[in-house]
Amino acid sequence: MPTALNDLLKATSRSFYLTLRVLPARVRPQIGLAYLLARTADTIADTELVRPALRRHALQILRERILGLREQPGNFTDLVRHQGSPAEKLLLEKVEDSLALLQTLSPEDLKLVREVLATITSGQELDLTRFTPPESAFQRDEDRLKLGLQSIIALETEAELDDYTYRVAGCVGEFWTKICRAHLFPRAGLDEKQFIMDGIRFGKGLQLVNILRDLPADLKRGRCYLPAEKLEPAHLLPETLLSPANEVKFLKIYRGYLDQAESHLRAGWNYTNTLPFGQFRVRLACAWPVLIGMRTIEKLRAAGVTELRRRVKVPRGEVRGIMFRSTLASPLPFAWRRLVSEGGKAVASGDELA
C-alpha cells in the first residue's frame, strides 16, 4: 500500500491501524484497503450538513465505482467542504487513489473486497433512509432543532438490529475469515461453518458494543438503535431513555444488550482460539478488539445514566496494557487462555497473569 494511503489509514483510525500493523503482510493490503473504502463511505453517510438524498446519491456512486459499474469519478466537492476533520476531508479527496488500488488485487481478493463493501454500504444507506425525515420535511426538522425539539427514530424490531449489526460489522468478520483462510492457513482442519459463524458474531459483538457505548450521542442525532419492540413494553420512549426517572427500567434493558454483546464477543474469543496457534499475528489482531470490547462492557455495566452520558471508554493507558500483556501471553497457551476468564471478564491487570 502506498505510503500516502498508509498514512491516511493511521490518521483515520488509530486503533484499527495498530491491528493492521500486526497482521501478516500477505493480508494487510486487502484488509487495509477495504477499511479505507468503508471509512470513506462512513464519512459520506455521516456528513449531516449535507442533505440525506445527496448523501445517498454519493454512496450509490461510490458503491458503483467499487463494484466496477461506473467509470466516471464521483464529484464529492460538497461533501469535502463540510468536513471538520482533516483526515476525513483527505479520505474524500483521495478516494480515487483508494479505488485505483482495487485494480492491484487478485480476482479472488477483489471479489471478497467488493462483496463486503457492497454489504457495508447497503447498511449505511439503510441508516440514512431509516433515520432521516423525508426530503420535504428536512426544513421542518431543522426548525425543530432550533427550538430544541428533536424527534428520535428508533429501530422497530430485534431483527432490524441484528440485520444492521451484520451489514456494518458481521460481514467484516466473514470477509476477514475468508481472506485470512485463503492466504494464511488454507489447509488447516477447521469446522468451516462454525468458524465463519463465530467470525460473524465477533463483528456483530464489536458493533453492538459501539452502539451501547455511543447511545447518548446517537440519541442527540435523532437515532435510537434499541428497538421499539423492546422499549414499548417497559413504557420507555427514546426521547426520555436517559432520564434519571427511567434509570431502573432503562438499565434492565440496557444490561440485557450488554449480555448479548458479551455473548457475541465470547464467540469472537472462541474464533480467536480456533485460529492455528502458529498464526500468532492474526490471533493478536483478533484478541485486542475482543479484550478491549470485554473491558468496555465491564465499564458500561457498572455505569448509571449519568456516567453513560459522559461516554464511557477504556483509557489509552489501559488499552496499551491489554496489548502488552496479550503479546507477552501469546506464546504461552495457559496464560493466553486466561486473558478472558470463564465468566467473560477481560484481564485488566498484570496480577491476573502472574
Image (cartoon, rainbow, N blue to C red):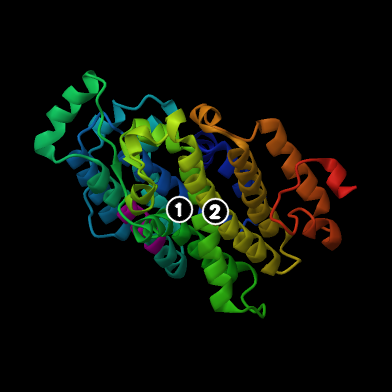
* Mark carried by residue 106: none
Q: Is 354 displayed left or right of 166 in the figure?
A: right
Q: Is residue 116 magenta?
A: yes
Rendered residue at 46%/41% (across/down): 250
Q: Is 325 displayed left or right of 184 in the figure?
A: right
**Identity of the residue furthest to the left in this view:** 136
Q: Is 185 displayed left or right of 63 in the figure?
A: right
Q: Position of residue 94 (x, y in %)?
A: 38, 38
Q: Which residue is mark 2?
A: 261
**Identity of the residue furthest to the top in this view:** 147
Q: Position of residue 150 (x, y in %)?
A: 26, 29
Q: Is residue 313 magenta?
A: no
Rendered residue at 21%/49% (across/down): 72
Task: State the SS at label 2.
Answer: helix
Q: Is 53 displayed left or right of 150 in the figure?
A: left
Res. 176 in view: no
The front one of 291 and 71 is 291
Does 41 appear above or below 260? above
Task: State the SS at label 1.
Answer: helix
The front one of 242 and 176 is 242
The amino acid on which the numbered mark 1 sits, given as a three-letter code, is Ala
Q: Position of residue 252 (x, y in %)?
A: 51, 46
Give neighbour class at mark 2: few <14, some 14-19, many 20+ (Cα, 10 Å): many
Judged by depth in the image, the label closer to the viewer, 2 or 1, is: 2
Res. 164 in view: yes
Q: Which residue is mark 1?
A: 34
The front one of 258 and 249 is 249
Instruction: Give the magenta range.
Output: 115-123
The amino acid on which the numbered mark 2 sits, given as a three-letter code, is Ala
Distance Cα–Cα, label 2 vs label 1: 24 Å
Does 41 appear above or below 102? above
